[in-house]
Image (tube, grey):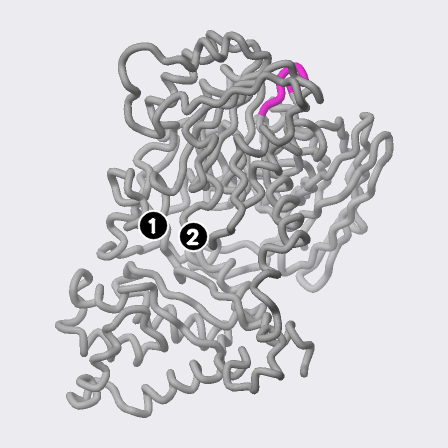
Amino acid sequence: MQGDHEKYLKVAACAKHFAVHSGPEDERHSFDARPTPKDLAETYFPAFEKLVRGGVEAVMGAYNRVYGEPACGSQFLLQETLRQRWGFRGHVVSDCGAIEDFHLHHKVTQNSAESAALAVRNGCDLNCGCTFNDLSVAVRDGLVSEAEIDTSLRRLLATKFKLGLFDPADRVPFTSISPSVIDCDSHRALARRAAAESIVLLKNANQTLPLASSPASMLVVGPTAANIPALLGNYYGVSPRMVTFMEGLLARVPEGCRFKYRVGCPLSQPGAPGVNYTFGAAAMSEVVVVFLGLDPSLEGEEGDTVASPVGGDRVRIELPDNQRVFLRELRQHSKRLILVLTGGSAIAIPEEHEIADAVLQVWYPGCEGGHALADVLFGDVAPSGRLPVTVPRSTEDLPAFNDYSMRGRTYRFAEKEPLYPFGFGLGYATLSYGELALSRSRLDETGSVEVSVRIKNTSERDALETTQCYLIPPRSAEAPKATLLDFKKVSVTARNFATVTFTLHAAQLRQVDAAGRWSWMPGEYQIVVGAAAPGSRAQLLGSPAHAVAKLTLV
């Protein structure tokens, strides 16, 4: 066997929603995305291209149209781009029900036979749904040939062969693995570590965290504190042991700690009138940990988001109004208030940031989420997560949701200073960045440059630092403000230092012109290495200083 497990694992990945699918959930079956050539090449395509060139086996199309063509039947996306330009050799699968959208919503075909034929002819090999049942009708009516269907069949069978689905069971290593391995101790330990390293510390005023090892009393409160969906997110597998945040903290506090739990407020609807017993419990507690934010009933795919008024997307990026009202009242009764945010997207909390003593974003951390949070709050694990998104200060700072232009979006093009910058996250240690050293100051389009920086830990705590390397091009109306080139997660022990080196190749420094072409553009650039995307807000929030050096492209 070739590499045993590795032989099969390398074909298990799928790139989803190719390629422009960030519009409103409730319009996705009918809208037509028309990004500029520059935005398509610079923002929407790169991640997909990297996956395809890295050997991904399956690509899933999107529901919407792109430049007038349904994404799951697009000659431009599936043939010209995916197979001809990028050399994709795997198979394409539709999103579920997307082929029937061709005739039901997009109105580019008349019936299911025409839709099935269009999908197969343009490169969609597998239908999640039942529209391909009418391929026999399409063949009879001359809409598609058996040879064209055979092309898709060969691609699908090739994937099955690669996965070992036609091999004898004794040659496929996965057949001998017991299901009990899935939830074994080592896997749960890995899940706990992954969850802990994903937690982002956004504020820590007056060293509120880590908590003392033996608090006298604690109140855990909030609609997501004991909420299993807040561990799982919208797509998930189920574990027989789900550790909620409340359970994780209860297991961690010492014997003798007076521990209380309250729901506090509903997730999104107004609370009941009358007395709320939460505030009395808060007043009697040394520490209040409040869990607010989102769960999959408010954000996710249509059909699952049963509490969303718009089918899964959020009309506003602020907390639900009732949660904001509850937190203001809770602050008046709390000695120390730690705000923990759950959810899978940016949450704008400018007022809440000021109200709380500490703020953390825990996302959807999985089966060990409760234990992982306790590890971080009590200092058993130092927080090392970094934001994978920019968090604006308000919904009004964003362009319209169905506007596919990148103007005003993300750390690369937004002009308004964010609440939290991309890449941001605090730790318990105190770190400083030294001067940036470049192996050369001038670079042509065939060369490379090494970038090194020394990070010093001046505290008594070990740190796990996510060091990020950005490129700032010469300023122009079309150029991004900055672009992340690479990052490395490094250990910096107490009272010690670590040297981080990045090797940048010329291809990484190319820019996209208005026509969507990647081009070598000579000029004076800046290389910036630090703990968040470049910007004044990162400094105000206490992020270590960035190290900067000039690089001339010739």
Residue occupied by mark 2: 235
The location of residue 155, given as percent across then percent down, is: 44, 82
Callout 2 crowding tier (Cα within 10 Å): few <14, some 14–19, many ≥20:
few
Nearer-the-camera pick, 331 or 125: 331
In the shown orientation, is residue 328 left or right of residue 335? left
Q: Residue at x 81, y 31 (%)?
A: 457
The location of residue 423, given as percent across then percent down, is: 59, 39
Between discs 1 and 2, the one toward the N terminus:
2
Q: Is residue 466 above or below residue 75?
A: above
Give residue 102's quadrant in the image.
bottom left
Q: Quadrant of the N terminus?
A: bottom right
Residue placed farthest to the right in the image?
Answer: 496
Q: Residue at x 56, y 36 (%)?
A: 370
Is residue 459 something that shows in the picture?
A: yes
In the shown orientation, is residue 412 left or right of residue 487? left
Q: Is residue 204 magenta?
A: yes
The location of residue 221, given as percent across then percent down, is: 47, 23
Give residue 537's quadrant in the image.
top right
Q: Residue at x 39, y 60 (%)?
A: 17
- Please, what is the three-letter code of the amino acid marked with disc 2? Tyr
In the shown orientation, is residue 260 left or right of residue 319? right
Alpha carbon distance from label 1 to label 2: 9 Å
- Please, what is the three-letter code of the amino acid marked with disc 1? Glu
Q: Secondary structure at mark 2?
A: loop
Is residue 533 something that shows in the picture?
A: no
Callout 1 crowding tier (Cα within 10 Å): few <14, some 14–19, many ≥20:
some
Of badges 1 and 2, nearer the viewer stands 2
Residue segment shown in magenta: 203-208
Q: How many marks?
A: 2
Residue occupied by mark 1: 301
Are the residues tagged 1 and 2 within 8 Å (C-beta)? yes
